[in-house]
Image (cartoon, coloured by chain):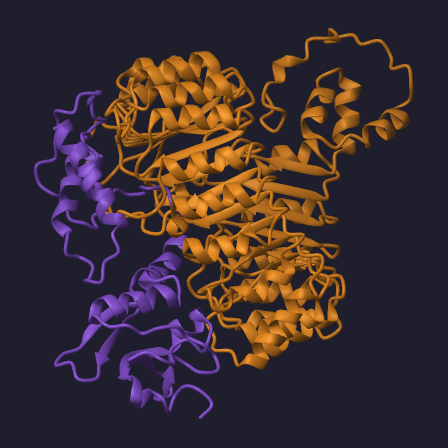
Chain colours: A orange, B purple
Amino acid sequence: MDPDQSEDSHSNSANSHGPTQPPSPFPDEVLEKVLSFIDSRKDRGSVSLVRKDWYNAERWTRSKLFIGNCYSVSPEIVARRFPRIKSVTLKGKPRFSDFNMLPRDWGANVHSWLVMFAKVYPFLEELRLKRMTVTDESLELLAKSFPGFKALTLSSCDGFSENGLKAIASHCRNLTELDIQDSVTDDVGGGWLSCFPENFASLEVLNFSSLNCEVSFDDLERLVSRCKSLRVLKVNDSITLDQLRRLLVHAPRLMELGTGSFMQELTPRQYEDIESAFSNCKNLQVLSGLWEATSLYLPVLYGACASLTFLNLSDVALQSSEFARLLVHCPNLRRLWVIDTVEDKGLEAVGSSCPLLEELRVFPSDPYDRHHRDGVTELGFLAVSRGCRKLRYVLYFCRRMTNAAVITIVQNCPDFTHFRLCIMIPGQPDYLTNEPMDEAFAAVVKTCTKLKRLSVSGLLTDLTFEYIGKYAKNLETLSVAFAGSSDWGMQCVLEGCPKLRKLEIRDCPFGNAALLSGREKYEMMRSLWMSSCNVTMKGCRLLAKEMPRLNVEVIKDEGSDDGQADRVYVYRSVAGPRRDAPPFVLTL
Amino acid sequence: MEGMMMAHETDLNLKATELRLGLPGTDECEEMLSAAKNNKRASPETVEECGSKGGSAAKSSHDEHETAAPAPKAQIVGWPPVRSYRKKNLQTKKTESESGIYVKVSMDGAPYLRKIDLKVYNGYPELLKALETMFKLTIGEYSEREGYKGSEYAPAYEDKDGDLMLVGDVPWDMFMSSCKRLRIMKGSEARGLGGAQ
């Protein structure tokens, strides 16, 4: 089974011919020409299953490769099947690695992939990596192996330093995109920016907002002024407001802007100049950054907000009043990310100012303080749901919630596709009735028929999982923490959700029976993560034995019981067990 | 237990909406009660304690209390699920957004000073009203031309440069960031600050 097909490959039952296939009614070239118009990878997956000549035509015409789990297939297998690839998307570590739940050096190193690509895909143009380890050596190899290379995205990656970026800047003559989102590195100096050659002007996307380095502003300014097609610019907090103004003067047609730091004392003249620079940005659709912006200088932005569709305030802790004032200028918002310092009052303003809102993410300002009293509550969420009926994506961190509120919220907004509710205190019940939050999530899965992604939290019994299994027919990703009562809960989900692809569980009372009940299911899924549950080494070994096409990997915690399987990662693979597993990853 | 928690909740709400001039942290004791809500094994423990046990079998009963109040900053690994680069930003933000702007307030002739948190007020009217209440006096109406004409007292402040300024001349936000201390001056002395004379 080819993992990089669409996930339910058994869907195509028509036309599965036997060993002797009648000749095709049209020549290969025609078939290839027709198939070259098909972009969607799901469609391509289906096409490749029709018959052998379609499979071949498809593989010769595929130019974009998507590998959702880098260990599900090997570079060799990919190279054999697809000869003409120009764009690769590769994802590595399981999502929980974002929260420090995987040791460093776990793996997902891109190097062996690049070595293969350098051999087989000299015309590679795009590389999008997520949660992979990327060393300077790899970046140098990348920079020197693909003369037509255009676009590099490193999302939540690690392992590189300034030297790698210098290599990219120096050698990629045709670079249009350099996007280092959320990738954090320890030792990055800012000298890389100066490595772009003097005549280099092709950049359209530049994002180094998460890098912790001082860049040479002069070099940045020259670069921005040369690159007339620049449409996305996201700088880091080493860039001051006044410097930003100068950049904006060179690039008034920006569509996406990530500002630098707003912490600067401005003279009235400077204030006016910056205000006017922002007002000249008529095309701005996305705005982020705004580090340390306060009510004093936020107003300089107002003139740029009329066409904003995505406002990302997750790096600036605003208070409700200044936030509300800003929102008044952003009537076209579709996506909004904020920190919970805006409180329920701020969310009321969202409800009244943003009728077109489709996505809301509220991040906690102080996630580790259990006694923190501020932040948002069920009231804020309710207020948003009343005013923003088109809401389909929510990520909400709070310390209290009620079943009644969630029930009302999904009645107001039945179109949720992504519902991620994080009640930050583990096992927290409905704060008014003291009951479990089962009914809340029951309402979510019953009402939101298009639900694809769900994160549950709070005090939950197996009942929640019974509901999920019974009603969440389109669910693809489920995240569970500190919930459930017994194996039965997990079994309900595994038996019930036909489209489930990713299941991540931590600190739940699910054991071997639950783990094993999903054995066939895991081959239809991308992966399963279970940590701090009741699964044992024995159970994992049994699973590994019964399902040879699954990789079952265990990482033990220090000082834990011999029999305990502390962190379990199960995923389907045609590449067999990992050859690069570090010693602490036990492949069963 | 439920009754206690209900009362605790209402109590919290009142306190949260109360306009206080006192320093924060005076009702610390109430916050410790909220720890009692936790009824699963997953109280803030280090990874060593968490990892060696299996999942808890706790159900919907609330019998399992954490008897000891947990150390405020002890964390469960990876919980809440917030990414580390975000944490770095938020740590610095916290001190800025949550600390008040405290300034001393002196009144001519009064034996001791007071201190207020400017962040508590949404604008000049609220601030002046609070000063009037605090010092039991009347300040009167502000006008750009004549300052606080006709009132016994006038509010002034010392700005970042050390100059004595009349309260009300600059936008509120600018005042908040430049005010170093407040001084309530006797009307006769304040004449020199306000008005065209």
Q: Where B94 falls versus A519 (above or below)? A: below
B98 displayed left or right of A59: left
Q: Where A168 falls versus B166 (above or below)? A: above
- Which quadrant holds residue A233? bottom right
Q: Residue furthest front?
A: B150
| Quadrant in which the N terminus of chain A is drawn | top right
Q: Which residue appears at 34% of the width and 88% of the height? A: B162
Residue A577 appears at what percent x and percent y? 45, 30
Residue B118 appears at what percent x and percent y? 32, 67
| Quadrant in which the C terminus of chain A is drawn | top left
Residue A530 can be seen in this image: no
Q: Which residue appears at 45% of the width and 78% of the height? A: B169
Q: Which residue appears at 43% of the width and 34% of the height? A: A382
Residue A78 appears at what percent x and percent y? 64, 34
Count every numbered label the image shows and give the total: 0
- Which quadrant holds residue B80? top left
Q: Where A186 falls versus A431 (above or below)? A: below
- A482 or A412: which is nearer to us? A412
Residue A330 can be seen in this image: yes
- A60 or A198: which is nearer to us? A198
Q: Which residue appears at 44% of the width and 56% of the height? A: A321
Q: Where B96 falls versus A215 (above or below)? A: above
- A168 or B79: which is nearer to us? B79
Residue B62 appears at what percent x and percent y? 16, 25
